[in-house]
Amino acid sequence: MTNPAKAIRIGTMIRATNEDAAKNIAKIADLGFESFEPFFWQTTNGQNLAELGKRCRDAIGDRDITISTLGMFGNPLEEREMDLQTLQGWKDCIDNAHHFGATCVAGFTGRIRDKPLTDSLPRYKQVWSELAKRAADRGIKIAFENCAMDGNWATGDWNIAHNPDAWELMFNETPDDNLGLEWEPCHQMVYLIEPLPQIRKWASKIFHVHGKDATIRWDVIKEHGIFGKEKFVFMRTPGFGDSSWTDIISELRLAGWSGSIDIEGWHDPVYRDALEMTGQVHGLNYLKRSRGGEFVE
């Protein structure tokens, strides 16, 4: 019998820009991860993605592990050399996702730098209408991560998809069914937005979920505010932050959602460096428990 618990898989992200994604997968494939998201930062560095996809699947072998999503993170809306490489990277990931077995490509929308968020909408519509059609022709979904990258409504460098008001504007400009979100609670919590109600409203647009949480220091906020010298929020690996992932996964299930929750590591201020994989495996097991634990037929 198919394990219905795995309608929601728990995995992790795999660096692919300057590292061998297939070798990285092979190193940790037996730790219990059920999915992987290979991701590129700004450029694919000219890699042959068809060949890389085959090697990643070979590294997985006959294990019950999937690659549902590729990540391509950069700013494809402007025209510096690296921005053009990012845009080409999106096209290459869309064209070659099937070699990984992936059905989704995720990343930032891009942004017109140092301008108000709304100034990016015309260029956003131009670029993403074309990429949405390219992806739809290949049966691929596009998911925008909800990370502000230190930007806000007034200014920023990378992404406009970090605020639910922006999502309304974006999906009005591009109503394509295959454009949605790579959602996580962390990036809402760092701006003191309550994440759980978003699932109920936006579930149909959530194509992929990142496993990343946050710890909000309310005592610091009450004494110093959010613009003082004291850090008021930390990004955390699931299991160490404030969110109840039992509630998050329950809301996703109630909405009929299925897909992968891939842990985005390298952010936790405690479980990092020598403790990075310790923290990630703890997060993996915590998320599996939050999913309901072992499937009982």
Image (cartoon, rainbow, N blue to C red):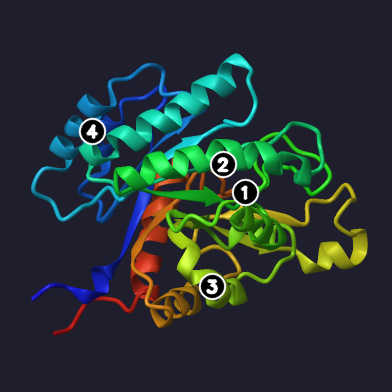
The amino acid at mark 1 is Cys
The amino acid at mark 2 is Phe
Check disc 4 and report the residue beneath it.
53
Mark 2 → mark 1, Cα distance in angstroms:
8 Å
Q: Which mark is residue 147?
A: 1
Query: Could you tell me if residue 280 is visible in this image?
Result: yes
Asked if 238 appears above or below 123 in the picture, the reply is below
Asked if 8 appears above or below 155 in the picture, the reply is below
The amino acid at mark 3 is Ile
Q: Along the horizontal axis of the image, is 265 left or right of 140?
A: right
The x and y percentages for residue 224 are: 91, 58
Q: Quadrant of the C terminus?
A: bottom left
Instruction: Please tell me which residue is depicted at 33% across the width and 54% down the height of the picture.
Output: 11
Mark 4 → mark 2, Cα distance in angstroms:
22 Å
Q: Along the horizontal axis of the image, is 161 left or right of 296?
A: right
Neighbor class of circle 3 (other Cα within 10 Å; few <14, some 14-19, many 20+) is many
Q: Which mark is residue 252?
A: none
Question: SS class of the residue under badge 4?
Answer: helix
The x and y percentages for residue 137 are: 32, 44
Check disc 2 and report the residue beneath it.
108
Nearer the N terminus, badge 3 or badge 1? 1
Check disc 3 and report the residue beneath it.
199
Mark 4 → mark 1, Cα distance in angstroms:
26 Å
Q: Nearer the viewer, residue 68 or 93?
A: 93
The amino acid at mark 4 is Gly
Mark 4 → mark 3, Cα distance in angstroms:
31 Å
Question: SS class of the residue under badge 2?
Answer: loop
Quarter location, residue 196: bottom right
Question: SS class of the residue under badge 3?
Answer: helix
Mark 3 → mark 1, Cα distance in angstroms:
16 Å
Neighbor class of circle 4 (other Cα within 10 Å; few <14, some 14-19, many 20+) is many
